[in-house]
Image (cartoon, rainbow, N blue to C red):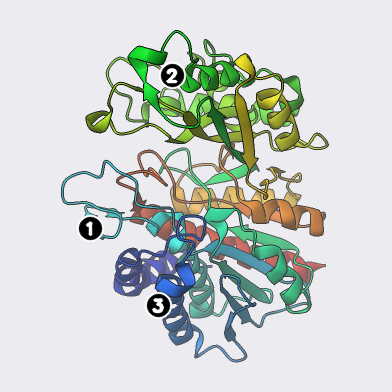
Amino acid sequence: MDSTRLNRFVGQIWDDAVVPSLVDYIRIPNKSPSFDPDWAAHGYMDDAVKLMEAWARARIAPIKGATLEVVRLEKRTPVIFITIPGEGTEPVLLYGHLDKQPEFTGWAEGLGPWTPVIKGDKLYGRGGADDGYAMYGALSAVLALHDQGVKHAPLRIIIEACEESGSYDLPFYVDHLAPRIGSPGLVVCLDSGCGDYDRLWLTTSLRGLATATLTVRVLTEGVHSGDASGIVPSSFRIARMLLSRLEDQDTGEIIPRGFYVDIPKSRLTQATEAAAILNKDVYAKFPFAGATKPMADDPTELILNRTWRPQLAVVGAAGMPAPANAGNVLLPSTTLKLSLRLPPTLKGNDPIALMRQTLASDPPYGAEVRVDADPFVSAGWNAPELAPWLEQSLMGAGRAVFGHDVAYMGEGGSIPFMGMLGEKFPKTQFVITGVLGPGSNAHGPNEFLHIPTGKRISQAIAMVLADHCAKSSAH
């Protein structure tokens, strides 16, 4: 491919068409079903689908044989499914999602989750980087190939609307669309992160996720703390005691060994190499308050903590009034929402069963303890070894587009679709990458899309698609 022409084409379509559409997309509060159970009635998800559908239809219209369908299974979130004819019989599947995380608090002045703002090379607002840009980035890559008459394999693009809720609807669509998807030789996912904005980062693993709600109940109603304290145990203290069974309160390490796996040597090596590139940037990207320090001094250990070791986060609480409304009352119950990140290759032991056994057995003081687990446990994923052609292609794309060698690192988040596809197509090659770099803050306040990185990833994917087709033709 002519890299100069590729750069110019992608830059123009992003500036003229992609960014303006993403601005409109950010304005839509289409929260994932877990955060908006009435999503169908509210209609925001349909608004986002219609926006992307119209944009994509206009771009693929000149491509002979290209199709777009909004697939709707009963009582499930919709899926945009695009097919584009190509050379050979081995299709490529490109994946992204359009549902969003909730608003969260702490947005800077002038910014907001549904308020798109462009500052310099950053587009602020919920969902632009996670993962609204994915469909635009994928089609920009495809259109760049057509601009130069470069061949590609048959393409399938899936944009789902349930990823932030664990993709529980997606397996039904994968089965429904299986005859039209075929057996992809390559899967491209644009819903991941990057260690920095200076190079192409390939995600080599993803952690799994188990979520549960821990409720400790000691009374049927609140009572005066002056009367009851010292007699009635605090539900919060009991919850704290139970969490200490699961997590070492001094180190943050998960205690039950059933949540651990042996880390592959290749991933240990990649973590060391990534740490050498990023050094203090492994943790400097986070907005630490005051004199807060990271959980280790060694950046390699920090990378392994966030990619291959189980970690617990308390992400929500109930039963406690806001401080301004808190009277001297011993609370009847405390409820904590727990998010347990799981190693990529954890198999066998049911993590929810182990969590429930750890937290609920033999409760202190005989308190009433309940562990309500989310039914869908998001499995982790470990990428298969790269085929020589793909390793060479990624290296060439990284150098041509970013000016640096490609870098490899696991990610701490979950993309349930990758685990599903890995089991369904064990011989498939994967390119998992994304724009979520330092400061981009997906799920939190001030989320932004780094526009230059979005453009570069579109260019890199175009080059990989071209190389894939060339490889297939050679065989």
Q: Residue at x 67, y 17 (%)?
A: 255
> Which residue is label 3 attached to?
51
Q: Quadrant of residue 78?
A: bottom right
- Residue sitting at the far top: 230
For disc 3, the neighbor class at 10 Å (few under 14, some 14 to 19, many from 20) is some
Kind of residue indicated by mark 3: Leu
Is 124 on the left or on the right of 470, as rendered?
A: left
Q: Which mark is residue 294?
A: 2
> Which residue is label 1 attached to?
117
Label 3 element class = helix
For disc 1, the neighbor class at 10 Å (few under 14, some 14 to 19, many from 20) is some
| Mark 1–mark 2 distance (CA, rounded to whole Å) | 31 Å
Say whether residue 96 is visible. yes
Q: Residue at x 47, y 58 (%)?
A: 131
Residue nearest the viewer, comparing 283 with 369: 369
Label 1 element class = strand
- Residue sitting at the far left: 109
